[in-house]
Image: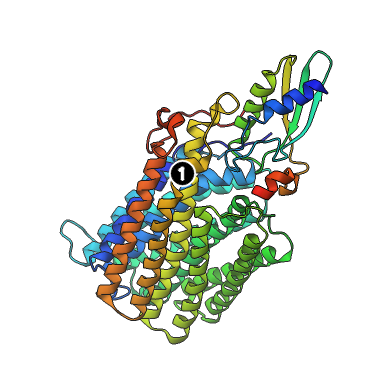
């Protein structure tokens, strides 16, 4: 749990370029699975399917999550099931949107 | 996971399109074409094709080469053909303009340049349609916007074919009753297929997705967008049948294009209702400038459609001219300019800052532009375009020139902002000295996906 919290904190540095907020508060990260040995799987989405920025976002997530102490390997999986919805945003972000 | 790549030639398409727009507006400001000349005079036709091919079609193709892969989740098939398409279109347009010029007695030109230009344009557009249709057919997600774009591409092919036939007729290669029928009845069909079928359907398809994305509004589902697509489909079929009738019998059976027009107007009304619904259901409270400017373009579509009804009813040149001016420069041109204001900074951001994400602080896309300045230029463009339409309607030639001058200044200032975005000149200090991209071509062929 502690490692997952650290990864979530690190991923707040990854800003969606179009919406201007971090991907955690935007609700784009669906799940973070930490295995024994520090192998991490991040299940996430992007606001638009097939967007040219998608690959850069996954690379950024890999880099930020990989920089957290205790993480040995990062696997980022993109999913569009369910597709991202504004309803996934944190309430405080939705208010300022 | 399929993802889209950056289209290497899109910015070059945009630059050529903007040059054509500046040329056309400059010529109108100098009093070239209607109303000083007839509506179908060579000088007017030069202007019409500079706008419809040089500005709008080049812009739309550049945008589709980037956007269609994003829409259907498939890399562009034959992306390397993009420069050849651009060359064929620009060379074809140059020949066409010289061909029209020959009818005005331009030295060094001849009528044969008309069919040569038409053939080059047909080749360029056929190549572009082939690339885009092949990409579309191999797509992962064949959605509603893709349906509109498929119809638009078929219209483009029909427009180019009819255009080449008209060019051959004007050059005197075709004679008899067919040539008379082609000039009198083929011209309105050519214009309807180009402005309505190709450009408007493509703009509708692209906007269904982009407006939803940019406003963070739920995509339109349910029967209405499908009704728009089916109305467009049947309307287009009516136009194609009218073309076939013309080719077979040397005349147009007018119930066909009239029915197409009625279906098109119903489709436009339903589409505009969908756009209003998108703005109303948006989650993004404050509108960015490009979406604010797009409201003006949607309003111009409504005004232009109403003017078309009046023109069809009263059949006066000044009404046709005003309707086409508002639709071409207000609806299609206004939407194009507003989307450019978003797409150019976004492509620039992807090129310069996307690789730094997660490793270093990056600016937002919005930081590349200065909306506080640019909103005045968009307001000037919209007001001047509307004024231009009114001046055509009231046959005030000198005031039309003034309005076109206003549009020209506004476009030049928007271009200035786009160039500043490419030069990263609007960014705050931390990024001001970041290496700049080249102005027209992306710096590398790096695939923007994993």
Task: Please name the residue shown 73% across and 17% down the image.
Answer: A73
Quarter of image, res B116: bottom left
Q: Position of residue B134 (x, y in %)?
A: 58, 45
Task: Please name the residue shown 68% across and 29% down the image.
Answer: A11
Quarter of image, res B360: top right
Q: Where is residue B266 in the image (x, y as percent from the top left)?
A: 61, 74
Whether residue B126 is visible: no
Task: State how the image is colored.
Answer: rainbow
Read off the residue under disc 1.
B344
Q: Is residue B348 left or right of residue A8?
A: left
Q: Where is residue B358 in the image (x, y as percent from the top left)?
A: 60, 26
Task: Please name the residue shown 31% across and 59% down the image.
Answer: B408
The answer to which of B177 and B33 lies nearer the viewer is B33
The answer to which of B230 and B370 lies nearer the viewer is B370
Task: Please name the residue shown 34% across and 63% down the image.
Answer: B167
Q: In this view, does B230 lie to the left or right of B52?
A: right
Quarter of image, res A89: top right
Q: Position of residue B13 (x, y in %)?
A: 41, 46
Callout 1: chain: B
């Amino acid at each position: 749990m502690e490692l997952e919290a650290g990864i979530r904190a690190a991923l707040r540095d990854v800003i969606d370029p179009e919406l201007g907020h971090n991907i955690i508060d935007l609700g784009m990260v669906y799940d973070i699975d930490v295995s024994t040995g520090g192998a991490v799987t991040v299940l996430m989405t992007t606001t638009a399917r097939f967007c040219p920025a998608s690959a850069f976002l996954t690379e950024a997530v890999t880099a930020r999550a990989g920089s957290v102490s205790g993480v040995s390997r990062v696997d980022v999986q993109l999913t569009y099931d369910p597709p991202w919805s504004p309803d996934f945003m944190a309430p405080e972000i939705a208010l300022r949107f | 996971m399929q993802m889209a790549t950056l289209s290497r030639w899109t910015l070059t398409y945009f630059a050529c399109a903007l040059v054509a727009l500046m040329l056309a507006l400059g010529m109108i400001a100098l009093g070239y074409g209607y109303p000083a000349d007839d509506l179908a005079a060579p000088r007017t036709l030069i202007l019409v094709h500079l706008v419809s091919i040089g500005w709008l079609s080049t812009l739309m193709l550049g945008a589709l080469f980037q956007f269609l892969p994003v829409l259907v989740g498939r890399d562009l098939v034959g992306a390397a053909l993009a420069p050849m398409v651009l060359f064929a279109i620009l060379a074809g347009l140059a020949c066409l303009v010289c061909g029209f010029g020959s009818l005005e007695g331009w030295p060094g030109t001849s009528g044969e340049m008309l069919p040569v230009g038409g053939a080059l344009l047909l080749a360029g557009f056929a190549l572009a349609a082939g690339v885009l249709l092949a990409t579309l057919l191999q797509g992962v997600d064949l959605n509603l916007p893709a349906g509109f774009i498929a119809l638009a591409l078929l219209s483009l092919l029909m427009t180019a074919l009819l255009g080449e036939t008209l060019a051959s007729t004007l050059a005197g290669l075709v004679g008899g009753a067919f040539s008379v029928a082609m000039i009198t009845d083929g011209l309105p069909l050519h214009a309807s297929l180009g402005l309505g079928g190709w450009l408007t359907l493509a703009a509708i398809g692209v906007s269904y997705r982009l407006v939803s994305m940019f406003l963070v509004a739920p995509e339109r589902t349910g029967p209405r967008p499908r009704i728009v697509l089916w109305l467009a489909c049947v309307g287009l079929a009516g136009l194609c049948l009218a073309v076939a009738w013309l080719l077979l019998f040397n005349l147009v059976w007018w119930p066909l294009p009239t029915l197409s027009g009625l279906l098109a107007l119903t489709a436009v009304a339903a589409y505009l209702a969908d756009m209003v619904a998108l703005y109303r259901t948006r989650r993004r409270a404050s509108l960015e400038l490009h979406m604010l400017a797009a409201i003006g373009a949607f309003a111009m579509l409504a005004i232009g459609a109403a003017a078309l009804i009046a023109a069809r009813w009263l059949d006066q040149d000044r009404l046709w001219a005003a309707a086409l001016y508002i639709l071409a420069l207000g609806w299609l041109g206004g939407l194009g300019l507003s989307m450019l204001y978003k797409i150019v900074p976004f492509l620039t951001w992807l090129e310069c800052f996307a690789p730094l994400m997660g490793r270093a602080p990056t600016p937002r896309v919005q930081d590349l532009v200065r909306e506080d300045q640019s909103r005045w230029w968009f307001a000037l463009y919209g007001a001047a375009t509307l004024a231009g339409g009114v001046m055509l309607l009231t046959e005030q030639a000198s005031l039309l020139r003034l309005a076109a001058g206003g549009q020209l200044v506004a476009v030049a200032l928007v271009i200035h902002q786009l160039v500043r975005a490419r030069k990263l000149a609007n960014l705050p200090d931390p990024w001001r000295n970041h290496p700049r991209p080249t102005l027209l071509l992306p710096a590398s062929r790096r695939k923007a996906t994993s």
